[in-house]
Image (tube, grey):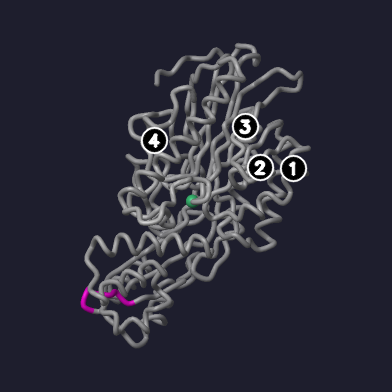
Amino acid sequence: MTQKAISFTAEKTGIMKLLHTSDWHLGQRFINRERTEEHERAFNWLLQVLREQAVDVLVIAGDVFDTGTPPNYALRQYYGFLTQVRETGCQHVLVVGGNHDSPATLNAPQELLKTLDIQVLGCAPRSPDGELDYAAEVLPVCDASGALLAVLAAVPFLRDRDLKYAQAGETAAEREAAIKQGIAQHYAQLAGIVQEKYEHCVPFIATGHLFAAGTTLSDSEKIIHVGNLGQISAAQFPDIFDYVALGHLHQAQNVGACAHIRYSGSLLPLSFKESQQPKQVLLVEFAGAQLTRIEPLPVPAFRTLLHLSGTLDALCEQLATLEVETCLNTWIEVELEHPYPEAQAQLQAALQEKSAELLKVVLKRTESQLNFNELSEHLEELTPQELFLRRCTVAQKTPEEQQALSSCFAELLETMT
Ligand SMILES: [Mn+2]
């Protein structure tokens, strides 16, 4: 994608600015803490960006909330933010649901928010007869004078029932191919509608909450469509889309070599490992229908999440010399190589009065300790998926059987959570 220089004296007319963010995971519980303060600070920063950059359209590509039943403080933060967006001059907001979001929760205020030019699609819309209503995902965005600014193909996370693939007796490979085809067909349908209805003199923008091929996963992304299932490649997104705003992967990245099909990544680091990743939102600029600039804007780090491992002595040393660089207290998890009776107290003492909190002390588990029979003491440290895989191993399932079983298990989990 070549960058075009835009004169600062250029008239606003014909230039459209979009801000792409995703995976807020409002209401996330981190070990035993809430992320409220970080979200509050991130939102204040985001509002400032919207104002300073004179953004026209804000796109939130799924996983607004961490769970389907978000706590009231998370709902308050969400609505509080949406209210303040209006005051920045950004007149259009699009929210699509992710796999963590409950479509019912997101959609409940849909009609009310629409009156404020905030479009919400918690799930793929359906017509009264229950069929997918593709046309309802196509949303024109107009400026105050009624002139068309952009056309959005607002695709939320597509659930199994949105992808017509379930066939009795099909193999895992057939199933995978059918999911991919279902997702690709969904985008093709939308492209058809957009092309038929609109002249391509404004940007055509698609969204999605999925796992695209040619990308890397980080550990807090819940496994969905396990293994390679559901991965679609850049080539499967129709050419007519000038920009595809994706969510689900927490690390900001392009899909394959395509700069215009990309993940903004999460707004905050959602795991200890993610604390190493720079977080960003994407400012995307168009002149007419032409994409002219994609600028990643780094989200300031408000809190450091630190995972340390080693012997007790080494850890005490590290904690004693720790430098706290972020405004909020550093949160620490330590992994001890050997058990030690007063480890917690010693580690705590090493931290002294630093602006840091020791959230968790765990014992490093070796492979031999991961025996199923010893699991009871570690049960709370395992995800349901990990526990299921352990049980498969004990039951001596082959890797192929494990893959097929864990795929079913993931689906079951997704239906239930
Ligand atoms: Mn997700």
Residues in magenta, as a range: 363-368
Q: Earlier in the sequence, mark 2 or mark 4?
A: 2
Q: Earlier in the sequence, mark 4 or mark 1?
A: 1
Q: Earlier in the sequence, mark 1 or mark 3?
A: 1
Disc 1 and disc 2 in contact, CB within 8 angstroms: yes
| Residue behind mark 2 | 120
Report x, y in % for residue 9. Answer: 61, 11
Tell me the mark number nearer the camera, choosing from 3 and 2. Answer: 3
Q: Could you tell me the amino acid type at mark 3?
A: Ala
Tell me the mark number nearer the camera, choosing from 1 and 3. Answer: 3
| Residue behind mark 3 | 135
CA–CA distance in space, label 3 to label 2: 15 Å
Q: Tag 2: Cα neighbours inside 10 Å, few (<14), some, or many (≥20)?
A: many
CA–CA distance in space, label 4 to label 1: 31 Å
Q: Tag 3: Cα neighbours inside 10 Å, few (<14), some, or many (≥20)?
A: some
Q: Which corner quadrant holds the N terminus?
A: top left
